[in-house]
Image (cartoon, rainbow, N blue to C red):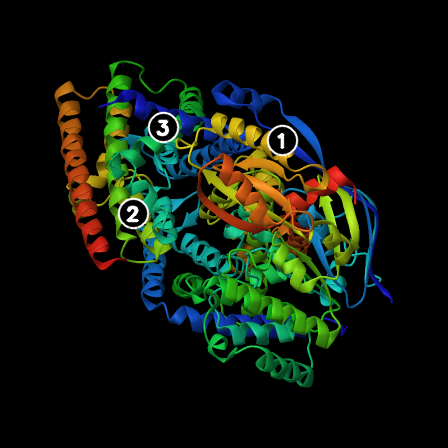
């Protein structure tokens, strides 16, 4: 694989994101306000019960989990479905397909630039803020490394799901509807809105068998539960690898098949 | 003749951000911004009487659209005075809008998903057109063009030509005093172009509507305008009768040729050969007869004044010196007219 | 030129709306998918809510039913911004491509003309969901239903709507000055998810901020209190209709100022 070719796309994405300096400030400010809301909300929630921990999660566990989930969401959301939908409707997709690079990797590397940028712009400041707000409740050790690897897998899974949904846009004009359904399902079932630990029993079991929890729940659990044995961590990451491979395979197959259908029909 | 549009010393300046290049430049931009003041329109004065069709010409970025935006009240001039139908457009935008019609580039102002007739009905309400006036106008439209098949078609499904036609009809619907047409024939085929020209002519004639027309197509100007205003780089170059201008460029045509010697489209050889050709021509044809030679992409352009020199003579002469692979004949372009004006000072 | 009264504008709006609905109905698949998407969003919101209260029976003295009331109240209050002012979301695109100029040539109010172009029918699903939730919690709490209470509910729902509309107007109008200000829209709309929580859970400083600077407390909490806890209504609740009108007016002015000073992109 020609690394340079791909890195050029990453670099172009970085430059593009930098053009908008005010928006970067706004994103940081917005995340900060959001952080405050979540902090007080859950402080109030925990103040209403007598016990220190609920479902094995203390106040600071929950806080770290939720805030980092949101900022993970912030940088993993690449608006891929929108872009694919728009390109399909305007016919611009033809140009991208005819580029001397496969469409799926092309999209992935094009978007990677903005992912790197928002990781720096949103995730790192949030992480630092959370670290100090909770008086260093996040353990800084080997778990950080595991976390970062796990995030890469999460990005791949998330991208593949988005790519799958984006492909659906070849069949329908309703980008908004499709995108919102995806977003809602992913956010709820991945444990981004409420930690999966809080889910009532049957629902919890079902969710753990779905690919979505690999996106948010796995990296965040690895990060926050530093006392977890290494075998457990590897087991979780193995599930991620499985889902990443499966999602990538299914998406690219679906794309290939759809493209054939579309070109045959001349749509 | 009453003045419908008065522009006095209008100037419009824009602040444009200088973006720096590359990764380092973007980071610098993040912290300090560097603005340039661009004068899009520079001290322009025009008076237009009611019922005139005025061709407003100039190359891309000359400031045509900016002037029109000022006349329609979208932009406020940085300095100077503009009156349209007695209104200051920027101050009374809605009042001004009631009495003008605008077709702006290829941006349809009609409701994208609605059939044309429904758009018309909404416009009828927006402009508060009386039933009788509306019906009369629709009757008149029917007598001009075959609009029945268009009326029940959503704008989104129309071809570019149909859409332009619809937009023009919509702009005239409320019987405005002035209509601004910005590049109405751009991208259309020859038959649609002539259809649109006939339509504009008829509407202007019947309703005595003043029409300001910007275009790149000298054919539009030739067919429609009695008066021409030319601007370039924001400054007014020319404001006079089309006949006066025609005296000057009317008999010019561009002979475009491609020579055998230039096979690899090398720009340098093209320049050299055109230079050589220019010298050969000036030896053969002296004074007024001598054609100007220039190049574009792959063609050599020989601008011939037909009053002095027959195109065939020029062609014959070139053939004695070079082998011509391909040729075509073109009417003079706006760009050439402007160049001529700069050179000759009309 | 005849005077343009409210009747004139209502008539035009009605006409555009009915035509728009007619043409939307011809895209049935899109309509159905979008509606399903909207229902998904609401159900997911409800599930998170339910999971939360499974773990925590009350939050700082606010019972499940009371919170549900605020939730339903906020859903209804968010309907107008969703249905009538949805074109704010497209503003950025129109401005960026230069298409916005086409709205400036009509002899009617620019803001009205722009917003009239889009009616988002999906919002009606949310309205139904909100009304259902409100009635359910209304009965469970046992609010004494008199004509006066109903009148109060309607007035304060409108008040709450004005705040959300104003926030979105302000967020959208940033795109007249900042390139790619989409983030601001996304962020502002995210605030509405937090509008449903009682402001009393915050510390005084943030109570002040969420009341006077980013007034999300007015989207459900202050107006809702009038009906929910009539014995402890703060002065701000009673003032909220007035503040709402002023705030909306300011946002309208800012939007218009942005639109008229917007210089088009080039050409």
Residue at screen point 55% across, 38% down: C179
For the C terminus of chain A, the quadrant is bottom left
Within 10 Å of disc 2 (Cα), the crowding (few <14, some 14-19, many 20+) is: many
Question: x, y (%) of residue A187?
Answer: 31, 43
Q: Is residue B231 above or below residue A70?
A: below
**Dot 2: element:** helix
Question: x, y (%) of residue A82?
Answer: 37, 47
Q: Which residue is mark 2?
A: A166
Residue A52 seen in this snapshot: no
Residue at screen point 71% across, 61% down: B225
Q: Is residue C219 left or right of residue B249?
A: left
Chain letter for the residue marked with disc 3 in the picture: A
Q: Which residue is mark 3?
A: A9
The mark total stands at: 3
- A204 and A23: which one is in front? A23
Q: Is residue B100 left or right of residue C34?
A: right
Q: Which residue is mark 1?
A: B17
Q: Nearer the viewer, mark 1 or mark 2?
A: 1
Within 10 Å of disc 1 (Cα), the crowding (few <14, some 14-19, many 20+) is: few
Q: Is residue A4 above or below residue C178?
A: above
Within 10 Å of disc 3 (Cα), the crowding (few <14, some 14-19, many 20+) is: some
**Dot 3: element:** helix
Chain letter for the residue marked with disc 1 in the picture: B
Residue at screen point 48% across, 55% down: C74
Question: x, y (%) of residue B9?
Answer: 84, 45
């Amino acid at each position: 694989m020609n690394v340079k070719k791909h890195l050029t796309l990453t670099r172009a994405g970085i430059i593009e994101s930098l053009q908008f300096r005010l928006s970067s400030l706004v994103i940081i400010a917005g995340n900060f306000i959001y952080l405050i809301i979540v902090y007080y909300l859950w402080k109030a929630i925990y103040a209403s019960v007598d016990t220190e921990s609920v479902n094995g999660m203390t106040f600071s566990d929950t806080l770290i989990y939720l805030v980092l989930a949101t900022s993970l969401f912030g940088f993993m959301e690449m608006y891929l479905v929108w872009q694919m939908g728009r390109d399909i409707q305007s016919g611009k997709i033809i140009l991208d397909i005819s580029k001397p690079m496969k469409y799926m990797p092309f999209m992935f590397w094009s978007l990677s630039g903005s992912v790197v940028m928002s990781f720096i712009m949103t995730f790192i400041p949030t992480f630092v803020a959370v670290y100090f707000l909770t008086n260093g409740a996040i353990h800084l050790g080997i778990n950080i490394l595991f976390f970062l690897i796990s995030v890469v897998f999460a990005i791949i899974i998330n991208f593949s799901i988005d790519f799958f949904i984006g492909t659906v846009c070849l069949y329908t004009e309703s980008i908004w509807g499709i995108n919102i359904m995806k977003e809602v399902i992913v956010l709820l079932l991945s444990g981004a809105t409420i930690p999966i630990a809080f889910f009532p029993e049957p629902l919890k079991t079902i969710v753990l068998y779905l690919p979505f929890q690999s996106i948010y729940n796995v990296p965040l659990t690895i990060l926050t539960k530093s006392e977890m044995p290494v075998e457990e961590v590897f087991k979780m990451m193995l599930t991620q690898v499985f889902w990443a491979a499966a999602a990538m395979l299914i998406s690219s197959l679906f794309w290939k098949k759809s493209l054939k259908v579309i070109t045959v029909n001349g749509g | 003749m009453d003045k419908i549009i008065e522009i006095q010393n209008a100037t419009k300046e824009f602040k444009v951000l200088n973006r720096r290049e590359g990764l380092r430049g973007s980071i610098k931009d993040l912290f300090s911004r560097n603005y340039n003041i661009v004068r899009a329109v520079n001290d322009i004065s025009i008076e237009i009487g009611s019922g005139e069709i005025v061709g407003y010409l100039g190359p891309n970025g000359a400031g045509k659209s900016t002037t029109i935006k000022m006349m329609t009240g979208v932009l406020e001039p940085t300095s100077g005075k503009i009156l349209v139908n007695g209104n200051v457009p920027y101050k009374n935008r809605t009042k001004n809008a009631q009495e003008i019609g605008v077709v702006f580039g290829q941006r349809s102002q009609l409701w994208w998903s609605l059939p044309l007739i429904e758009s018309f009905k909404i416009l009828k309400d927006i402009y508060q057109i009386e039933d009788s006036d509306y019906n009369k106008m629709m009757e008149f439209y029917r007598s001009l063009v075959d609009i029945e098949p268009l009326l029940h078609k959503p704008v989104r499904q129309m071809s570019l030509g149909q859409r332009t036609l619809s937009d023009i009809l919509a702009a005239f619907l409320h019987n405005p005093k002035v209509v601004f047409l910005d590049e109405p024939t751009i991208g259309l085929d020859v038959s649609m172009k002539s259809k649109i020209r006939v339509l504009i002519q008829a509407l202007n004639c019947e309703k005595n509507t003043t029409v300001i027309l910007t275009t790149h197509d000298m054919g539009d100007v030739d067919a429609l305008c009695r008066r021409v205003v030319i601007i370039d780089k924001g400054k007014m170059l020319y404001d006079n009768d089309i006949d006066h201008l025609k005296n000057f460029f009317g008999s010019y045509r561009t002979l475009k040729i491609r020579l055998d010697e230039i096979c690899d489209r090398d720009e340098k050889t093209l320049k050299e050969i055109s230079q050589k050709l220019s010298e050969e021509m000036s030896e053969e044809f002296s004074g007024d007869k001598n054609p100007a030679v220039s190049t574009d992409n792959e063609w050599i352009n020989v601008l011939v004044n037909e009053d002095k020199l027959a195109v065939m003579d020029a062609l014959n002469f070139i053939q004695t010196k070079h082998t011509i692979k391909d040729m075509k004949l073109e009417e003079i372009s706006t760009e050439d007219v402007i160049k001529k004006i700069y050179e000759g000072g009309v | 030129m005849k005077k343009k009264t409210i009747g004139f504008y209502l008539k035009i709006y009605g006409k555009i709306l009915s035509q728009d609905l007619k043409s939307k109905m011809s895209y049935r698949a899109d309509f159905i998918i979008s509606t399903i998407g909207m229902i998904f969003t609401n159900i997911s919101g409800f599930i998170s809510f339910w999971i939360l209260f499974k773990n925590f029976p009350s939050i700082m003295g606010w019972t499940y039913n009371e919170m549900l009331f605020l939730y339903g109240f906020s859903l209804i209050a968010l309907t107008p911004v969703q249905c009538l002012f949805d074109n704010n979301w497209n503003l950025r695109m129109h401005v960026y491509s230069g298409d916005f100029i086409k709205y400036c040539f009509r002899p009617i109010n620019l803001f009205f003309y722009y917003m009239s172009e889009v009616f988002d029918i999906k919002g009606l699903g949310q309205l139904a969901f909100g009304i259902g939730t409100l009635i359910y919690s209304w009965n469970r709490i046992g609010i004494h239903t008199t004509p006066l209470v109903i009148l109060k509910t309607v007035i304060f729902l409108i008040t709450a709507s004005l705040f959300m509309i104003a926030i979105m107007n302000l967020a959208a109008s940033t795109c007249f000055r900042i390139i790619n200000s989409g983030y601001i829209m996304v962020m502002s709309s995210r605030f509405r998810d937090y509008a449903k929580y009682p402001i009393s859970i915050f510390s005084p400083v943030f109570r002040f901020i969420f009341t006077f600077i980013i007034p999300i407390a007015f989207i459900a909490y202050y107006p809702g209190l009038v009906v929910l806890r009539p014995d402890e209504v703060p002065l701000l609740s009673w003032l909220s209709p007035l503040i709402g009108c002023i705030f909306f007016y300011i946002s309208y002015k800012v939007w218009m100022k942005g639109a008229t000073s917007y210089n088009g992109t080039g050409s």
